[in-house]
Amino acid sequence: MFHLNPSSGVPIYRQLVDQIRRLIAAGQLRPGDSLPSVRELAQAHAINPMTISKAYSLLEHEGLLLRQRGKPMRVAGRGASPPSDVQGALHEPLAQLVAAGRQLTLTDAEIQEALANFLQRERRR
Amino acid sequence: MFHLNPSSGVPIYRQLVDQIRRLIAAGQLRPGDSLPSVRELAQAHAINPMTISKAYSLLEHEGLLLRQRGKPMRVAGRGASPPSDVQGALHEPLAQLVAAGRQLTLTDAEIQEALANFLQRERRR
DNA sequence: ACTTGTGTATTATTCAAATAATACAGTAAT
DNA sequence: ATTACTGTATTATTTGAATAATACACAAGT
């Protein structure tokens, strides 16, 4: 069900997180669907159950998965996710951008313009 | 001249590489300019000269810097400086920000608003 | 109660990347 | 030749993330 390559440079738990996120986004996994047990996956890929659990936990923290004690993880429903801390989650990338801009002696307006241009270009693709 | 944070999660040598790349792209550092000596930078930031050297070597390998035995590193290229490419210089931090925003399912306008807010707050400090 | 299935908290281990120590080689001025 | 600068090759050490071992808690069927 999943492609996990232990020697790819990308951590296994991250490969799993990315793949599950994509499957949910694409609708392959739908709200209510349950996921393979950590032991099942662990055995199939010859890795430790905790590695799978780590991936599941991250996705649960993101609001994409639901945990139910003693039962398998399930895909969460849409909009069922708790209100995310937008300012908090964006703080780091914002700070990075602004620091980079300042180092180039850009004004605030110029930084905003750079973002506007970037979004504009993306929209064109 | 540089902002190096040893406890940021991002390796120091990589922070340096990124910043120098941006400064060159934006024209802040021009062909022929020489860079601070590894010891100077190392002392200023209380880190090992080899860490700086590692950054310099990577940039030399990229063709952005020139090494001259016994002499300081210099920015590669000669003659007129290439046109300043602020947009290109900021591409990475911009992409990071937008990716984070998309992850939160924000609209482009909301991402721009978050930046505006951030700048506003900074101005107040 | 027992068995067999969930996930996971806690702790230990592994392993590779990042950093540092040391010694060396080139340049240039004195 | 000496001094005072450059950067770096080589080696060692540190550090932190990724992974694993172990033991535990809950659920559900028997």
Image: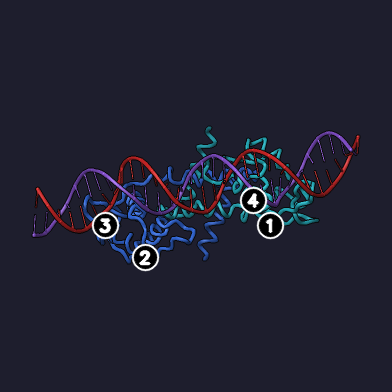
Chain colours: A blue, B cyan, C red, D purple
Q: Which residue is mark 1?
A: B61
Q: Position of residue A54 (x, y in %)?
A: 36, 51
- CA–CA distance between discs 2 and 3? 17 Å
In this rendering, the label closer to the viewer, 3 or 4: 3
Q: For mark 4, give the secondary structure.
A: helix
Horizontal relation, residue D13 to residue A42: left or right: right
- The chain carrying label 2 is A
Q: Is residue A105 left or right of residue A122?
A: right
* Residue drawn where x is 46% and y is 46% of the image: A90
Residue position marked by numbered label 3 in the rendering: A74
Mark 1 and mark 4: Cα distance apart in space: 16 Å
C-alpha span from label 2 to label 1:
37 Å
Comparing marks 2 and 3, which lies closer to the viewer? 2
Residue occupying image coordinates x 29% and y 58%:
A39
Task: Give the residue at mark 4.
Answer: B22
**SS at mark 1 in the image:** helix
- For marks 2 and 3 on the same chain, the one whose residue lies earlier in the sequence: 2
Circle 1: residue type: His
* Dot 4: chain letter: B
